Image: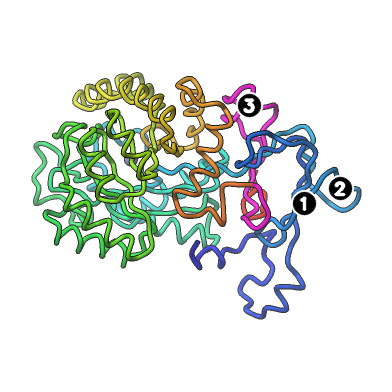
């Protein structure tokens, strides 16, 4: 994790905020104690009962048996506690309805974008997602501003990793060119990551790293919600992908590839990426390659249903609806196969394809398509944390990690849809809900 989170100041965990004297921090460090009737820690395969979690400052210092007999504590006797959830693929700067007319991105100001991110950050956190990865924004660096604002405590939101702009070929899945719209009228800040050839991709990837990206996002193949292109067709070459991977790994950050088609998934894995987004049309060879290289799939298996219904109702472009139909069921079948073969699956919804805050609607589809409820929870906690490089900090209720937890009424292992109604959200020891 980065220094930024060490600087995070919350109202309950405000010890030493703005004060650099270590002994003062040590003497006034805040403590939060939570008692959980049932606890799913994100790593173990079985839940435990009657546990007390002690959080000092923002980190968990102990998890002990039984209920506290004195002092203030948050009593969640009737609840199941889980680690704060992680969504590894979101677009915090975007709203679901934007897809009707993508030209809105040409006209939004950075201030308007930050306002949108602020609202989306609040609903995402309230839904129990205490960590998200923002994988690209047309508006360049808006999500970085949102990340930094949350870290400063300007407004509530999840811990955010952001990729900055999309790394994509001209006219590719991450290049917002709209048919009939004059290219010269498109603001330059919309197209910061458009490149051609390994050298140019290396340069743009370096610009993303230098600008403060926590992760790099490459558009290896065509997108569903973009004009032109075929979702399965490779766009970036393996040499271009390799150039980006080299820059990212030299900087110690992960690279994730948007790739629907089997060939582009294989190209990206061979280029050395850490994870694949969508993986809709993965074939047996791509799945075997992912297992061999320990590359995770982040498969947004719910949102196809949303696009098919709401997208049609709202009149999204026919091309998007068609490409969605071509990939939805195929992706769900690939999900079942990939999971059975042992590909690590990480929870990534691609919100705002559907509204932020509804992220947990994806859990039931993951279970329907072959995961146990516990596996689907781990995909959104410890496994996600590992693949975004934050396994020391988030994704499990264990000593040393941040005091990020949620609580639900009832047993999510009996009914995974319970995760759609999170009663309590604590981030870094501070209760948000
Ligand atoms: Zn996306």
Indicate the position of residue 154 as horizontal and vertical percent values: 52, 60
Classify 10 Å Cα crowding around label 2: few (below 14), some (14-19), many (20 and above). some
Q: Is residue 405 magenta?
A: yes
Going 41% across and 24% down the picture, which residue do you hit? 336
Q: Which residue is mark 1?
A: 33
Q: Is residue 115 inside the magenta stretch? A: no
Q: Residue at x 91, y 48 (%)?
A: 69
Mark 2 near mark 1, Cβ–Cβ under 8 Å? yes
Above or below, 190 against 296 in this view is: below
Which sits in the foreground, 156 or 54?
54
Q: Secondary structure at mark 1?
A: strand
What's the coloring here? rainbow
- Residue 218, position as x, y percentages in the image: 26, 48
Quadrant into which the C terminus falls: top right
Circle nearer the N terminus (2, 1):
1
Marks 1,3: beta carbons within 8 A? no
- The residue wearing badge 2 is 68
> Which badge, 1 or 3, is on the more N-terminal residue?
1
Q: Nearer the viewer, mark 3 or mark 2?
A: 3
Residue underneath mark 3: 413
Tell me which segment is drawn in magenta: 397-425
Seen in the picture, residue 190 relative to 418 is either above or below; the reply is below
Q: In the rendered structure, are the residues bearing label 3 and label 2 in contact, judged by CB atoms less than 8 Å apart?
A: no
Determine which quarter of the picture holds residue 198.
bottom left
Residue at disc 2, CB closer than 8 Å to ligand 1:
no
Q: Quadrant of residue 140?
A: bottom left
Q: Quadrant of ligand 1?
A: top left
Binning the other alpha carbons within 10 Å of mark 1 as few (below 14), some (14 to 19) or many (20 upward) gives many
């Amino acid at each position: 994790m980065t220094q930024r989170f060490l600087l995070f100041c919350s109202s309950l965990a405000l010890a030493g905020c703005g004060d650099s004297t270590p002994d003062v921090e040590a003497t006034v460090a805040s403590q939060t104690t939570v008692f959980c009737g049932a606890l799913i820690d994100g790593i173990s395969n079985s839940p435990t009962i009657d546990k007390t979690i002690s959080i000092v400052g923002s980190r968990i210092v102990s998890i002990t048996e039984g209920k506290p007999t004195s002092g203030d504590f948050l009593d969640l006797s009737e609840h199941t506690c889980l680690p704060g959830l992680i969504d590894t693929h979101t677009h915090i700067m975007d709203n679901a309805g934007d897809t009707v007319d993508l030209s809105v991105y040409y006209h939004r100001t950075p201030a308007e974008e930050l306002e949108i991110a602020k609202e989306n950050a609040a609903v995402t956190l309230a839904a129990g997602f205490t960590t998200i990865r923002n994988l690209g924004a047309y508006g360049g660096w808006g999500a970085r501003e949102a990340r930094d604002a949350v870290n400063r405590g300007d407004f509530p939101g999840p811990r955010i990793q952001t990729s900055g702009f999309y790394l994509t070929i001209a006219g590719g899945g991450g290049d917002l060119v709209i048919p009939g719209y004059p290219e010269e009228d498109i603001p330059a800040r919309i197209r910061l990551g458009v490149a051609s050839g390994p050298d140019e991709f290396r340069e743009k990837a370096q610009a993303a790293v230098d600008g403060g990206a926590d992760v790099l996002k490459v558009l290896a193949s065509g997108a569903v919600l973009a004009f032109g292109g075929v979702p399965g067709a490779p766009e970036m070459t393996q040499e271009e992908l390799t150039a980006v991977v080299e820059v990212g790994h030299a900087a110690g950050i992960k690279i994730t590839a948007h790739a629907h088609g089997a060939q582009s998934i294989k190209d990206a894995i061979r280029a050395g990426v850490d994870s694949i987004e969508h993986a809709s049309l993965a074939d047996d060879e791509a799945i075997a390659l992912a297992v061999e290289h320990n590359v995770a799939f982040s498969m947004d298996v719910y949102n196809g249903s949303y696009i098919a219904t709401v997208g049609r109702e709202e009149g999204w472009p026919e091309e998007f609806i068609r490409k969605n139909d071509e990939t939805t069921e195929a992706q769900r079948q690939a999900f079942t196969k990939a999971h059975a073969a042992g590909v690590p699956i990480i929870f990534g919804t691609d919100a705002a394809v559907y509204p932020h805050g509804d992220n947990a609607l994806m859990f039931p589809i993951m279970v329907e398509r072959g995961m146990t409820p516990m596996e689907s929870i781990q995909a959104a906690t410890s496994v996600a944390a590992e693949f975004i490089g934050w396994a020391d900090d988030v994704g499990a209720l264990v000593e040393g990690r941040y005091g990020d937890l949620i609580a639900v009424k009832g047993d999510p292992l009996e009914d995974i849809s319970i995760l759609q109604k999170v009663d309590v959200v604590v981030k870094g020891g501070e209760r948000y809900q």
